[in-house]
Amino acid sequence: MTMNIDAIRNDFPILKTICAGRPAVYFDNAATAQKPLPVLEAAFEYTVRSNGNPHRGAHIFSLAASEAYDGSKETVRRFIGAKSVREIIYTRNTTESLNLVARSWGETHLGPGDKILITIAEHHSDLVPWQRAAEKTGASLEYIYVDKKTGHFLPEDLEKIDDPAVKIFAFAQVSNVLGIDFDPKPLIARAHAHGAAVVLDGAQSVPHKKVDVTDLDCDFFAFSGHKMGSAGGIGVLYGKERFLEEMEPFLMGGDMIDRVEEQETSFAELPMKFEAGTQYVEGAVSLEAAIRYVEAVGFDVIRAQEARLVKRTLEGLQEIPHIQIIGPADPVEKEGLVSFNVEDVHPHDVAQILSAEGICIRTGHHCAEPLHRYLGINASCRASFWFYNTEEEVDYFLEKLKGVRPMMGYGE
Ligand code: PLP
């Protein structure tokens, strides 16, 4: 699979930022991706030509805002294979989407004796809301653990899914630390076999691969625009209509109502029932443009480029002494990111040394503190890619990484 990498990189002016005498190497895409010019232009165009309050006026700008906002939902619906725009709710990000489910579904459907099942690999945004739901409802929070070497779910722990006391099973399609795609479809079917609801965190899958929520058959699906080239502050919650219909609204106020009396209110139809207040239309426009951009590049091209980068990184890391790769070391098992540690050197020192060379990686616990603790480490380094990264950047990163231990006073 080939692509014109120079043309693509020209769409991302930030990649030309000079740092340490060369264009900065941006390997922190799992945290947030850079935004291409067509996305920035779409939001700018909307703002200078059409800005108004959506769904609230008869004038041209309000109508234009409503059209832009509602139109973007159709693009999102098609992009993730949902059946209806009634199933697409805009939120600020994955975190808010998951909180919405934990609050509006969790707190009314769970009680003592029920189990919430998650995995030890979850990002805090798919963990802390469930802790809270458990505390509030008396349900218990159970974990599926991973094999410390391979990163895959322990087969014996997968049996927890079959427990009829499990009322909801929430997990990330792709781990933001291990990089594994957990192949959710069979796990979803397994939970459905006894009627459990399934929430899939798609924050790290949607930017890299085609997702079809209808085919996966998940009941909820969450992702963030900023990890796939849109403005920050716009995210999506997909929910099956029959779930959303009977759920309580998350926030109350304007736009989410049907009729308001002094003492009571009836709520708007889906999806507005879950979208209180003036919405982020620029964000919706930006997300739509990001989807179009990603689709124009093509997931086959994106995946092929990321596979090349991951392979080169893993092969290079394995040639450097004293590097510990976290999770599987087989490139086919990594979705666009590689986490690792350098023996004797704190990840923050690794990041600082690389930063001085113009290389941006992420370090810390990556909002997955329980996973790190379980693996017996405090923190790790993570290089995460998108299709605009190059093999030349990977080689530069590997070369500079080799110098980290000597710089800290250790042998190679
Ligand atoms: N879930 C996963 C797997 C993530 O990697 C992230 C962010 O890194 C999130 C959820 C939270 O995303 P956001 O901060 O956009 O809400």
Image (cartoon, rainbow, N blue to C red):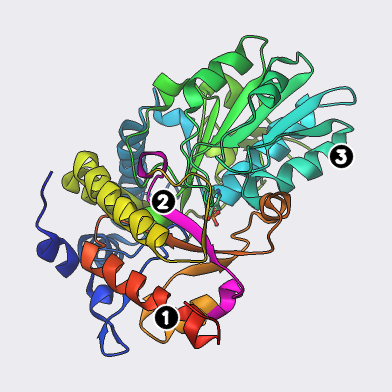
Q: Which residues are magenta?
A: 331-349
Residue 339 appears left or right of 365: left
2 and 3 marks in contact (CB < 8 Å): no
Question: Residue at label 3?
Answer: 136
Residue 87 appears left or right of 143: left
Q: Earlier in the sequence, mark 1 or mark 2?
A: 2
Depth-wise, is mark 2 or mark 3 nearer the camera?
3
Cα separation, mark 1 vs mark 2, equals 54 Å
Q: Earlier in the sequence, mark 3 or mark 1?
A: 3
Residue 157 is drawn in which quadrant?
Answer: top right
> Residue at coordinates 31% horizontally, 78% vertically from top-left?
24
List x then y, in percent, for residue 227: 41, 55
Cα separation, mark 2 vs mark 3, equals 35 Å
Is any atom of residue 254 visible in this view? no
The amino acid type found where label 2 is placed reads Pro
> Residue at coordinates 47% horizontally, 29% vertically from top-left?
87
Depth-wise, is mark 1 or mark 2 nearer the camera?
1
Is any atom of residue 318 visible in this view? yes
Q: Secondary structure at mark 3?
A: helix
- The answer to whether 121 is drawn above or below residue 156 in the figure is below
Which image quarter holds the N terminus? top left
List x then y, in percent, for residue 22: 25, 84
Q: Residue furthest front?
A: 411
* Labelled disc at residue 403: 1
- The residue carrying pointer 2 sits among few (fewer than 14), some (14 to 19) or many (20 or more) residues within 10 Å by Cα, namely many
Question: Residue at label 2?
Answer: 54
Q: Secondary structure at mark 1?
A: loop
- The residue carrying pointer 3 sits among few (fewer than 14), some (14 to 19) or many (20 or more) residues within 10 Å by Cα, namely some
> Residue at coordinates 57% horizontally, 72% vertically from top-left?
347
Q: In front: 107, or 370?
A: 370
> Residue at coordinates 86% horizontally, 39% vertically from top-left?
136
1 and 2 marks in contact (CB < 8 Å): no
